[in-house]
């Protein structure tokens, strides 16, 4: 059994950083992983991917040669990958018992409604991968509860936060973990001399909990906007109803500066893909002698 983790989420949510931290963490835990870059526009990697879509096709070439914009170009690159899926099969080779971390591009449309990622997942499943996704949302989103739940306030409907996670989950239909990334930016400042710090810290913790298990009532929290704009209020009420009826989204907080936090994320991933559950029990000869405590007598 092989395992793949699609690392998804909006632009800048920390996908590539998550991948490189997780690769390092896997190694430190004496486990192995392979990193695959699925972003044809990627420029720089802290952890060099061993499989890279840019070796098949790059966004820059697509835009130059076919005169596409960045979004059309990205879709073209994905379609090209699916048409040349033999390339991927060959690159994937015979890796066994490892995690394949797939660093995805940040275009949200790719997750919420295009059939391209579902097709890729289907193919991975056909060639024996058990696949799951992590969806990263950066912790700064909780500073704006409207942005956290629904859409950017532009004229175009763009789901963000909870709703984007929800539509991506529904579009992909694979085991799923939502992660609130960059928690180091939220939990910092604990050693302040301020006597109110402890109390403020506690309140902050309680507040964060309302975002980790999204409490849609936050949307109806007496903001002046809700009173002045009836349509806005009605929209929020409808979203509250939607989230209450379909409580699909919960977030796992992740602080990459903390090894326990990374380990916790990894154990959630292990759990949703049922890592190792189908493996044959190890024969004694496979075990090193050091695996047993010395007999004392
Ligand atoms: N403080 C903090 N910053 C982070 C963390 N993860 C990522 N960043 C920063 O956030 C920015 C974006 O991170 P990336 O990992 O490139 O995000 P991405 O989701 O891969 O971005 P795209 O590929 O462009 O969609 C970078 O400046 C990172 O240094 C984190 O856990 N904590
Ligand atoms: Mg990236």
Image (tube, rainbow, N blue to C red):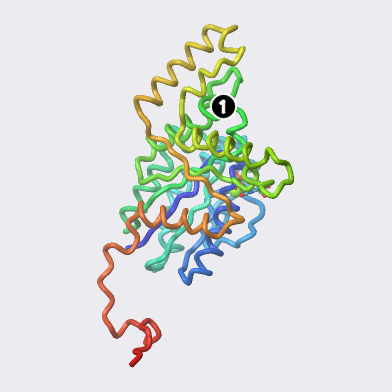
Please determine whether, in this image, residue 146 is positioned above or below residue 109: above
How many numbered circles does the render carry? Answer: 1
Please determine whether, in this image, residue 229 is positioned above or below residue 183: above
- Residue 59, given in percent of the width and then of the height, sits at 60, 45
Answer with left or right where residue 208 lies relative to residue 185. Answer: left
Quadrant of the snapshot with the N terminus: bottom left
Residue at image position (38%, 48%) is 121
Residue at the extreme right = 193
Residue at the extreme front = 195
Residue at image position (41%, 65%) is 98
For residue 185, say whether it is visible: yes
Locate residue 48: give its quadrant.
bottom right
Residue at image position (46%, 63%) is 91
- Residue closest to the eye, 102 or 272: 272
- Residue closest to the eye, 92 or 64: 92
Q: Secondary structure at mark 1?
A: helix
Quadrant of the snapshot with the C terminus: bottom left
Please determine whether, in this image, residue 13 is positioned above or below residue 239: below
Q: Is ligand 1 less than 8 Å from the beta carbon at label 1?
A: no
Answer with left or right where residue 293 lies relative to residue 262. Answer: left
- Residue 32, given in percent of the width and then of the height, sits at 47, 68
The residue labelled by disc 1 is 145
For residue 67, say whether it is visible: no
User: What is the crowding at mark 1: few (fewer than 14 residues within 10 Å), some, or many (at least 20)?
Assistant: some
- Residue 166, given in percent of the width and then of the height, sits at 42, 33
Answer with left or right where residue 278 lies relative to residue 223. Answer: left
Residue at image position (54%, 57%) is 52
Please determine whether, in this image, residue 219 is positioned above or below residue 203: above
- Residue 118, given in percent of the width and then of the height, sits at 38, 42
């Amino acid at each position: 059994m092989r395992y793949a983790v699609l690392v998804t989420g909006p632009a800048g949510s920390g996908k590539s950083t998550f991948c490189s931290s997780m690769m390092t963490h896997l190694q430190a835990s004496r486990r192995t992983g392979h990193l695959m870059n699925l972003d044809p526009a990627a420029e720089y990697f802290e952890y060099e991917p061993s499989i890279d879509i840019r070796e098949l096709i790059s966004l820059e070439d697509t835009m130059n040669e076919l005169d596409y914009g960045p979004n059309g170009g990205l879709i073209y690159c994905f379609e090209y990958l699916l048409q040349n899926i033999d390339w991927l099969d060959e690159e994937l080779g015979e890796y066994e018992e490892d995690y394949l971390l797939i660093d995805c591009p940040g275009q949200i449309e790719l997750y919420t409604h295009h059939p391209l990622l579902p097709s890729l997942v289907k193919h991975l499943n056909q060639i024996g991968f058990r696949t799951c996704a992590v969806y990263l949302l950066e912790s700064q989103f909780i500073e704006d509860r409207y942005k956290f739940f629904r859409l950017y306030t532009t004229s175009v409907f763009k789901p963000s936060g909870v709703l984007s996670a929800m539509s991506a989950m529904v579009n992909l239909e694979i085991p799923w973990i939502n992660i609130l990334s960059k928690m180091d930016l939220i939990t910092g400042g604990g050693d302040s001399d301020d006597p109110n710090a402890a109390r403020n810290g506690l309140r902050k913790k309680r507040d964060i909990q309302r975002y980790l298990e999204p409490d849609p009532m936050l949307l109806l929290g007496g903001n002046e906007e809700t009173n002045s704009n009836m349509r806005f209020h009605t929209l929020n009420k409808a979203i509250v109803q939607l989230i209450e009826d379909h409580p699909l989204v919960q977030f796992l907080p992740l602080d990459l500066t903390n090894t326990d936090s990374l380990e916790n994320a990894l154990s959630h991933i292990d759990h949703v893909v049922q890592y190792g559950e189908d493996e044959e029990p190890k024969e004694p000869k496979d075990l090193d002698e050091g695996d047993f405590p010395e007999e004392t007598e």
